[in-house]
Amino acid sequence: MARITKLEDIVSLCKRRGFIYQSSEIYGGLASCYDYGPLGVELKRNVRDAWWKRVVRMRDDVVGLDCSIFMHPLVWKASGHADKFADLVTVCKKCNTRTRVDHLTDHVEEHTEHVAIETAMADAQNLDKKVCPACQTVGRFTEPMAFKLMFETQMGANVDDTMTLFLRPETAQGIFVNFRNVLDSTRVKVPFGIAQIGKSFRNEVTTKAFIFRTREFEQAELEFFCEPGTDEEWYEHWKQARFDWYLNLGIKKENLRFRDHDPDELAHYAKACVDVEYKFPFGSGDWQELEGIANRTDFDLRQHQRGMRTLNSWYETKGDLGSIKLKEEAEDYHKGPLSFFDEQAKRRYIPYVIEPSAGIDRSTLAFLVDAYDEEEVRGETRNLLRFHPELAPTKVAVFPLVKKDGLPEIARNISDDLKKHFTCFYDQKGAVGRRYRRQDEAGTPFCITVDGQTKEDNTVTVRDRDSMEQIRVGTDGLKAYLLEKLGI
Ligand code: GAP
């Protein structure tokens, strides 16, 4: 099977077939922002649904949530983002390009997600040997400085009550601040998880690489609350569950691996963290983060208890996050408002949290890359996307062989009936061979053709995208046949 080596091929296919376009393209485009076209929006929705199905609906111990993007500014003080969510950057004195210090190498390459400022500081020691990725000049950089990654905006119409808010850089904090609400309004008990899918925003220094790293993106995050002491077991559980999710949706095993974070690479809240990495066809290292699974301990809930205690001082400082200091932790913090009371053990504690955090856009890119294939068929190149049926944007295409003899009417009826169950595309234009090729390129698992024989014996041909085999199936049993084959 051909392995695509150039990201350009994927970008071009995405544009040509309506998966993904550059944002505001008619105005010259907006860097690092992308729009999902008719096929892309279905694909991305399927990725999202597949995550929600496995992480929420198919389990008894996970519930869902959908929080607002704007949150109280103190949330970001308590979480550590207001002070620490920054990249160490330097500016090339020759071309003025700003680059992350940890992205500078002796040669230009792609890198992983944000590293701790301390780790980047180590890289900053030998800037004189580093190359500017924009103009290739060696060693002419300014002193490194912290570059904050959260977008700011103003809320409120009146001067007196206007306040500075942040676009959330992760969906996780909305879950932590609703922990008490969910405990009080549902029947969940630790161990349990709260899941959320939604947009996050980061003013990334380095973007490039299509939808891999953008400034506006969608995350799918689970915060799984467990008793301290059981956290390592749950960490292993979620590591495996998330790895299997990608494999079960068709990602090839040889393109997926785990990478444990080194202790000096860990985020400020994490006791342990592992990345699920995918072998993307760009960057010198190939392997790039697809998802992170972290043991966040009780850090966030404890921090939000401190945040709640700081609220009065926040009003006194008129909401100036820079000058405000979080109140110390209460001595009996484990009995605080974000604690959990274990009825059986008669014990109160702050739960530990295991967090699998995936990127919906980044997974969509991985599914596209992994499904892409080219093969020679009778002297011609066939481009196809071998999507898992659950992810395929269109499940079935229906064609009349010719545009006469009543065949279009029969095909339309079949298509209208199937549309009640899954996405179905009707097409009567052009030679049937070309119609098959178009659907191969869109990743449609099955094509149905209505021909002269249909009028005689009520059968149609069903063509399989991957094997190109065609069999005849009776129209009465067609829906059941397809549902079984698609596994949905
Ligand atoms: N709550 C933890 C957290 O946000 P992260 O490693 O910064 O952890 C988790 O992000 C996932 O979100 C990443 O593995 C990636 O899939 C996705 N992601 C992060 N930044 C992104 C960006 N700028 N563009 C696209 N996806 C991004």
Image (tube, grey):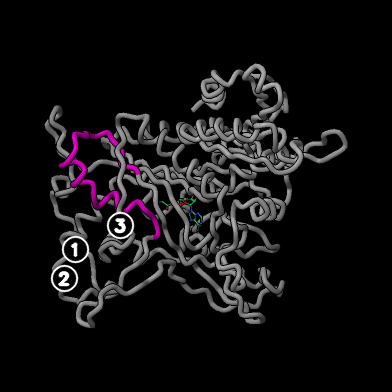
User: Which residue is depicted at the point 60% across and 18% down?
Assistant: 474
The circle drawn on residue 61 is none
Instruction: Tell me the element at label 1.
Output: loop
State whether residue 170 is above or below residue 57. Answer: below
Q: Earlier in the sequence, mark 2 or mark 1?
A: 2
State whether residue 476 is above or below residue 486. Answer: above
Residue type at mark 1: give it. Lys
**Crowd tier of the residue under label 2, counting other residues whose Cα lies within 10 Å: few below 14, some 14–19, many 20 or above:** some
**Crowd tier of the residue under label 3, counting other residues whose Cα lies within 10 Å: few below 14, some 14–19, many 20 or above:** few
- How far apart, in angstroms, are the residues tagged by discs 2 and 1? 9 Å
User: Which residue is depicted at the point 36% across and 62% down?
Assistant: 81
Q: How many marks?
A: 3
With 302 as the anchor, is 312 left or right in this view? left
Give coordinates of residue 362: x percent, y percent: 54, 49
State whether residue 467 is above or below residue 202. Answer: above
- Looking at mark 1, is its residue's CB closer than 8 Å to ligand 1? no
Instruction: Tell me the element at label 2.
Output: helix
- Which residue position is annotated with label 1? 327
With 352 as the anchor, is 408 left or right in this view? right
The image quadrant that residue 306 belongs to is bottom left
Q: Nearer the viewer, residue 486 or 208?
A: 486
Give coordinates of residue 182: x percent, y percent: 21, 43
- Looking at the rendering, the stretch of residues picked out in magenta corresponds to 169-195
Residue 188: in magenta span? yes
- Which residue position is annotated with label 3? 68
- Which residue position is annotated with label 2? 313
Residue type at mark 3: give it. Ser
